Image (spheres, coloured by chain):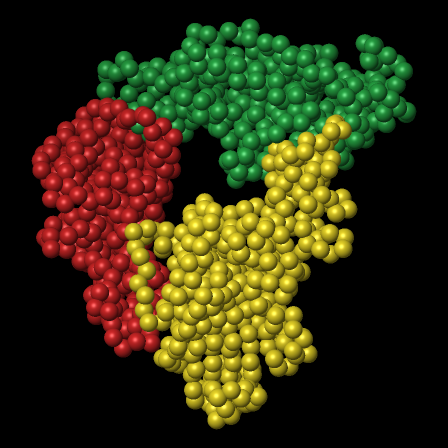
Chain colours: A yellow, B green, C red
Amino acid sequence: MNAWYAAAYDVELRRELLPRTICGKKLVLYRRADDAIVALEDACWHRLLPLSKGRLEGDNLVCGYHGLVFNPEGRCVGMPSQETINPSACVRRYPVVERHRFAWVWMGDPALADPATIPDMHWNHDPAWAGDGRLIQVKCDYRLVLDNLMDLTHEAFVHASSIGNRAVAEAPFEVTHNDQFVTVTRWMRDIEPPPFWAKQLGKPGNVDRWQIIRFEGPCTITIDVGVAPTGTGAPEGDRSQGVNGFVLNTITPETDKTCHYFWAFCRNYKLGEQKLTAELRDGVTRIFGEDEVILEAQQQAIDDHPERAFYNLNIDAGAMWSRRLIDRMIRAEQASAPSPIRQAAE
Amino acid sequence: MNAWYAAAYDVELRRELLPRTICGKKLVLYRRADDAIVALEDACWHRLLPLSKGRLEGDNLVCGYHGLVFNPEGRCVGMPSQETINPSACVRRYPVVERHRFAWVWMGDPALADPATIPDMHWNHDPAWAGDGRLIQVKCDYRLVLDNLMDLTHEAFVHASSIGNRAVAEAPFEVTHNDQFVTVTRWMRDIEPPPFWAKQLGKPGNVDRWQIIRFEGPCTITIDVGVAPTGTGAPEGDRSQGVNGFVLNTITPETDKTCHYFWAFCRNYKLGEQKLTAELRDGVTRIFGEDEVILEAQQQAIDDHPERAFYNLNIDAGAMWSRRLIDRMIRAEQASAPSPIRQAAE
Amino acid sequence: MNAWYAAAYDVELRRELLPRTICGKKLVLYRRADDAIVALEDACWHRLLPLSKGRLEGDNLVCGYHGLVFNPEGRCVGMPSQETINPSACVRRYPVVERHRFAWVWMGDPALADPATIPDMHWNHDPAWAGDGRLIQVKCDYRLVLDNLMDLTHEAFVHASSIGNRAVAEAPFEVTHNDQFVTVTRWMRDIEPPPFWAKQLGKPGNVDRWQIIRFEGPCTITIDVGVAPTGTGAPEGDRSQGVNGFVLNTITPETDKTCHYFWAFCRNYKLGEQKLTAELRDGVTRIFGEDEVILEAQQQAIDDHPERAFYNLNIDAGAMWSRRLIDRMIRAEQASAPSPIRQAAE
């Protein structure tokens, strides 16, 4: 719980009430007149009606049942038919920061909320990069999405018609890890580019292709991907003849078995082509749709076989270290104050 | 359980089998050839098939699976392929009385069923009053509907476009209670009438408006409502220049989290205008549809926050006393014979 | 579990992956290039994804997530990005035999799987008989279907417009049983034939009608049915002037509350008339559709009344002995090795 979770894409937040469930807690989000984002508990102090069923009155929120008024701090400042307001009348306020085009909420102890620990997804608003993304609601444990992203071998089987080919499944890879990150690096040298990358590069011939996956706990993965013509020095550090993208992913648990999967694809070429941005966003949407089918079937299979454990192959090293890092974070948090929700998610 | 519950509107009952769940029990209702209403347990003694899947044969009910025949007393009077009928072969019969346009069933000990204790809703068939009503199935604990009706402050927020205005939320009110009734009286003097009442009155100028809510346990609420031109003496007892309506409500638990909400709106003016009767019925249907959305969202919120209790404001005094009266009825009943269903509903 | 269960009709199985749940276990079925049927556990050893979401590669099955390859024995013979295959990597293989137009799987200990114990449904492929059938998915405990078939009295009430008439409910019957079979024999002599049989016979006048129901544990029922003109000696053994059909039924538990109901209707007359075969199949489909409504309502009623037991009438003797035979089989199996699934089904 003591972590920042992406709660919404920036464009989702307006002068309207947006209900959203994060880590099993119901929140209502909206923008104040000065554009700042507010995140409150989505249940009226009085009779529990979701505040998101009410309406904004200036920067305050008015409950849709009996008209109790709450300010952006969550404090009740108006009650029907009575002058004195119960001093205990308030709803929980969550710390929230807008950064890298996401609204990040802190679900744990507010005293520990340090914006410096928000994951680095700067490509999503850096003028040297162009791109866009989406939110997908996936009916699975968020860690299944992490497993999926930490091992891209599955591209060869799930995405055979677009980005996958046997080279991904056959190329060797290297895993490193420390207290904060797990990194999986895979170089596929001198290969025929898959259809997607051939089109992006726009040059004939074989390529060197890279996938550098970086996990940052509890739920963010950035993937540095690209191709360059073989022989132009990309593996040695000169990517100038190639094309480079970053797949940004942050997956927020909604419940134990559903999650909000926020992603973006940013590129460092043809920055001004709006059409390409839209094409890429729609293309990645299609590819991730293929994953969604697999992930939801896998969650169903886990529910159907509660007695079965996962086996690990060599390819699962990245996912395995990521899960260990998550487990370590949970244990560290429980050592100070046990969180029943997070234990349930385990 | 030892109470009369409305099971159906009179027009719902014909020479056909109507299945209905009351307080968690499945019943089948129908009219005999002499128009009397029969209420039996809706599960065949033999193999549990709902008897409502069968058919009427005269005044008897024939099971749709193996053809067992039950008379209106619930006794089996015919079995396939055998002459001797097991003397234990019967289904439970419930006492039922048709009154005030409703079929009232007694769910508890038949020996205690006294028709004199049926709630007074005489306006619904009194020639001095005209009106009609409907049955709404609401997915919430019936007590949430009672809470809603015992405090009409919510009209200002939920029904702002029809009957609600700030005056309702601002006017003082008075609550009285005894062993049988809880009464909430609110007079709004010299106010601008809301659109609905301005139209009913058909006279210009400010009005005195009244709402006199009377709860009768376990689940009936009649609301005496109306307006009269200010200065014509309504608060002092002379309503002759005004218009008067009675909103009749009786809410029957179906399960712990669903209920049958029967209502009617009766008026003492323009008695012969059928069109007005239909307009009022449809108008109230729309208004109660606004409540339905709120009530189901509230039930969902209660399920989502099992650890949370309700806080009471001043406006909740009527609802609070009504719930206490219900609790007292339940305790009195449990003192004689514990009823597991009712306890579950608690 | 130590029994053969029909898993699929022969025509359902092709060079494609068919997922099917049998006795609570998820299986994937397909045909090899040589037409032999394969039945494997439908969950990848690695990450549990249903193998039925993958694809065939020759006679092997390739997982749709990470490309693990399994042979028809269930052994993993290929893993992505690694040469060495974990020797424990395999999924369970179920013995399967194709006979009488069904694929029969053995759900228990493979060492005990003896094809000689597959129930006799030879009419379904015997050239002296013509017919066809279907699979119906019914949302009820498979034993409710058995109850239904072991007592055809219900024809008079459920199928009054086709095969049923009062004669069925009124005729006496005889029940015999031994360690393997329960047989219910009912002769209706000198009766007016119901519409269905009048049409099949194509001769005027009264008939002798027979229904000889034979249960074979745990879940197969064959019904020898037919009519012959009264006086031509059918009850004494000469059916030559009549028409004869066999209703073949085998009901495979899917879960505790759903089942796969495989049936066929075979006749010994007008063998070459394809149109009649189709007409009969569609007619029986309609009749069984009437049963399906009743059976699912009955299952619902059982769930709604967990405290209620079934009462037995004289007509239930066949069903009662069948259930006793099933219980005896379960006890015998549990005596050697307890099966938690089967116990849950009890």
Q: Above or below — where is C196 with respect to B216? A: below
Q: Position of residue A134 (x, y in %)?
A: 58, 64
Q: Position of residue A84 (x, y in %)?
A: 73, 29
Q: Position of residue C279 (x, y in %)?
A: 33, 49
Left or right: A207 as drawn, with respect to B267: left
Residue positioned 65% across, 20% down in the render: B318
Indicate the quadrant where residue C293 lies.
top left
Is residue A294 visible to us here? no
Residue positioned 51% across, 35% down in the render: B307
Residue positioned 36% across, 28% down in the render: C305
Q: Above or below — where is C132 with respect to B142? A: below
Please state the total of marks drawn on the protein image. 0
Q: Above or below — where is A319 with respect to C166? A: below
Q: Nearer the viewer, residue A307 or B263?
A: A307
Q: Nearer the viewer, residue C320 or A215?
A: A215
Is residue C106 visible to us here? yes
Left or right: B99 as drawn, with respect to C41: right
Indicate the quadrant where residue A316 lies.
bottom left
Q: Nearer the viewer, residue B158 or B176?
A: B176
Left or right: C298 as drawn, with respect to B331: left
Residue positioned 47% across, 83% down in the render: A209
Q: Nearer the viewer, residue A87 or B47?
A: A87
Q: Position of residue B57 (x, y in %)?
A: 40, 20
